[in-house]
Image (cartoon, rainbow, N blue to C red):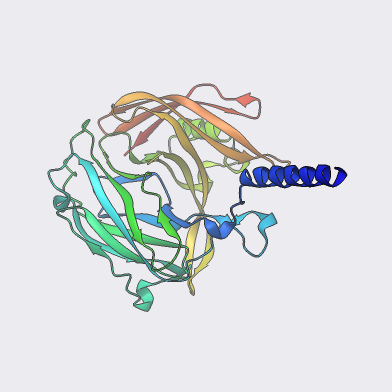
């Protein structure tokens, strides 16, 4: 009888173990997930008379196979793959072929060399009538770039346009060549030809206008001590640029420096640049509100956010820009700059 009790107990124990094991989930390891190719950015824009633009395809970060505790890194593919993409959802022009003239693909080997320089063919194919294309994403490479040549005259009409002009690009599929590779086919890259009769473009402040010069110093000296100490004799020109999603205030100094790039030395003017990203910009009007934010370094070395808010008005090529700055518990009065295109 005692032996029977032990036998029944053993059977029940084994049954319980089997039931428990049925609910176990085998953990996924890094190699179970495919490497993912995706668009490196959500969008870009250039002035309407620009003759080219580009987008990049990159590999997503994944765990570092050599040291997983240090987080993600880009792990290149072990073999070439073919990535398929599509240009679609275009507005403001009758056909893709009327704007996109040609295309090429390349990748950066170092700061001074691309695959084009080495005659490496990425086998780019692009049909302007359908917007569909394909390109080789090579093994051992982290990112490639596809550049379109565009018709620079198509939108350059000297007229303020309020109608949308854009196109979208997305990745559609990949031929994995025996590897675990997928594309992110949900995200899109949007390209906008920016109207240079609107707010976009480069403007110049009259350095010889003492009142305007001091207004600039008071406004942007808030976030940059170099600007705060400038005198008119130090400055060659002052420019303000409205770009895709970005504001730049640039002081070109008379002082020069030697810059070496790709084995060549060039004498250039030193520059002081302040930049921020737009939080708000009414770019479909000739006057409206704007706000941009950026970061500036304190004496302690910490980066602290600054904000500029205000409005703009365009009249006959002149920009009237009124801003108030806030930075590190300080702020400026409302200051108006008058700039020429």
The residue shown at (35%, 23%) is 288
Q: Position of residue 258 (x, y in %)?
A: 53, 65
Q: Position of residue 73 (x, y in %)?
A: 58, 58
Q: Who is closer to the viewer here, 300 or 11?
A: 11
Q: Quadrant of residue 122?
A: bottom left
Q: Who is closer to the viewer here, 280 or 128?
A: 128
Q: Position of residue 168 (x, y in %)?
A: 28, 45
Q: Who is closer to the viewer here, 64 or 98?
A: 64
Q: Who is closer to the viewer here, 338 or 152?
A: 152
The residue shown at (48%, 72%) is 262
Q: Quadrant of residue 156?
A: top left
Q: Is residue 301 visible?
A: no
View extreme (front): residue: 1
Q: Quadrant of the C terminus?
A: top left
Vertical order, 22 against 159 (above or below) = below
Vertical order, 109 against 25 (above or below) = below
Left or right of 256? Residue 137 is: left
Q: Quadrant of residue 136?
A: bottom left
Q: Position of residue 151 (x, y in %)?
A: 18, 53
């Amino acid at each position: 009888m005692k032996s029977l009790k032990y036998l029944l107990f053993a059977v029940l124990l084994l049954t319980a173990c089997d039931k428990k094991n049925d609910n176990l989930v085998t953990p996924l390891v890094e190699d179970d997930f495919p490497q993912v190719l995706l668009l490196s950015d959500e969008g870009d824009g250039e002035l309407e008379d620009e003759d080219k633009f580009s987008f990049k395809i990159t590999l997503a970060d994944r765990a570092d196979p050599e040291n997983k505790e240090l987080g993600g890194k880009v792990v290149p593919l072990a073999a070439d793959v073919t990535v398929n993409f599509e240009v679609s959802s275009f507005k403001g022009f009758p056909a893709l072929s009327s704007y996109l003239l040609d295309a090429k693909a390349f990748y950066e080997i170092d700061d001074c060399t691309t695959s084009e320089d080495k005659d490496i063919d990425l086998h780019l194919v692009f049909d302007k009538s359908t917007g569909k294309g394909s390109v080789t994403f090579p093994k051992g490479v982290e990112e490639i770039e596809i550049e379109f040549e565009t018709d620079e005259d198509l939108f350059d009409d000297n007229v303020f346009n309020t109608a949308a002009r854009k196109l979208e690009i997305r990745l559609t599929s990949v031929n994995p060549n025996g590897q675990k590779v997928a594309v992110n086919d949900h995200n899109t890259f949007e390209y906008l030809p920016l109207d240079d009769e609107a707010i976009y473009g480069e403007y110049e402040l009259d350095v010889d206008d003492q009142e305007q010069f001091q207004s600039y110093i008071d406004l942007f000296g808030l976030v940059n001590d170099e600007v705060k100490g400038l005198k008119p004799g130090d400055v060659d020109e002052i420019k303000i640029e409205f770009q895709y999603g970005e504001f730049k205030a640039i002081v070109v100094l008379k002082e020069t420096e030697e810059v070496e790039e790709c084995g060549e030395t060039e004498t250039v003017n030193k520059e002081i640049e302040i930049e921020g990203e737009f939080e708000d910009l009414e770019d479909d009007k000739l006057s409206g509100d704007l706000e941009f934010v950026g970061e500036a370094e304190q004496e302690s070395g910490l980066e602290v956010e600054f904000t500029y808010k205000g409005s703009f008005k365009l009249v006959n090529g002149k920009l009237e820009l009124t801003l108030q700055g806030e930075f590190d518990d300080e702020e400026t009065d409302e200051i108006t700059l008058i700039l020429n295109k």
